[in-house]
Image (cartoon, grey):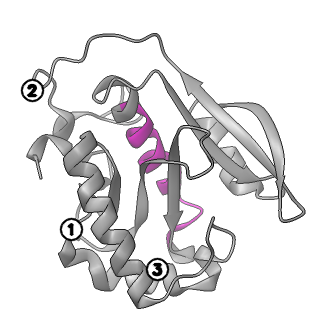
Amino acid sequence: MSPAWTLRTGRLRLIPVAWTDLADLTALKADPRVFAVMLGGVRGPVQTAEELAEDIRFWAARGYGIWTIRDAATGAFQGLTGLMERPDGRGVALRFALWPEARGRGLAREAAGAALMFGHEQAGLPRIVAVARADNIASRTVLGGIGMTAAGGFLREGVEMVVYESTRAPRQVMRGAATPDTARWPPGRS
């Protein structure tokens, strides 16, 4: 993994997933408080390992993917965020999931905002989507707070889903020119 793929915000380090994260990811994805409302639901250890292998391959192929969210001071695992192709063809999607104990402090907004900024500025993605349950006000607040706008919806298993998007004019990405490890979210703050 390229060191340029590691991001730092005011309170967090976002590190591309690796095999050393398997235990943390297995615990997070098995917790119904976190993954019961996620696409695909709660995962077991085998499915989590398979997804981790795919996430690592995705990083190598695309230069973006899923990060672990870690406390910058302690290294404690807080959750995950990142960018992945949606299986329904809606495009590259921003995802985030944090431990319930990490919620309510703006960490999801900080991490998701950094991932969104990386997607546009470093990966050169002109359009990034996110999908949230209509009744998931916390996630919808995060998405709106980082500048994504509601752009449609659909039903998934009888549940109303809202599609958000963020668009930026395409630009040439100069690999190696930026230093994501020093990027700050939100912009203008240190």
Going by the numbered disc 2, the residue's amino acid type is Gly
- Labelled pair 1, 2 in contact (Cβ < 8 Å): no
Occupied quadrant, residue 119: top left
Q: Decide if residue 147 is in sight here.
A: yes
Query: Residue 28 — which label?
Result: 3
| Crowd around label 3: few <14 · some 14–19 · many ≥20 (10 Å) | many
Of the residues shown, which amino acid type is indicated by label 1? Ala
Coordinates of residue 83 in the picture (x, y in percent): 43, 46
Residue numbers of the magenta segment? 102-117
Cα–Cα gap, marks 3 and 1? 15 Å
Q: Tell me which amino acid carries mark 3.
A: Leu
Kindly identify which residue carries mark 2: 176
Residue 40: which quarter of the image?
bottom right
Q: Which residue is mark 1?
A: 18
Residue 169 locus on image (x, y percent): 46, 10
**Horizontal and vertical percent position of residue 147:** 59, 29
N-term-proximal mark, 2 vs 3: 3
In the image, which is nearer the foreground, mark 3 or mark 1?
Answer: 1
Label 2 crowd bin: few (<14), some (14–19), many (20+), radius 10 Å: few
Q: Going 90% across and 63% down the picture, which residue do you hit? A: 158
Labels 1 and 2: the sequence-earlier one: 1
- Say if the magenta span includes residue 187: no
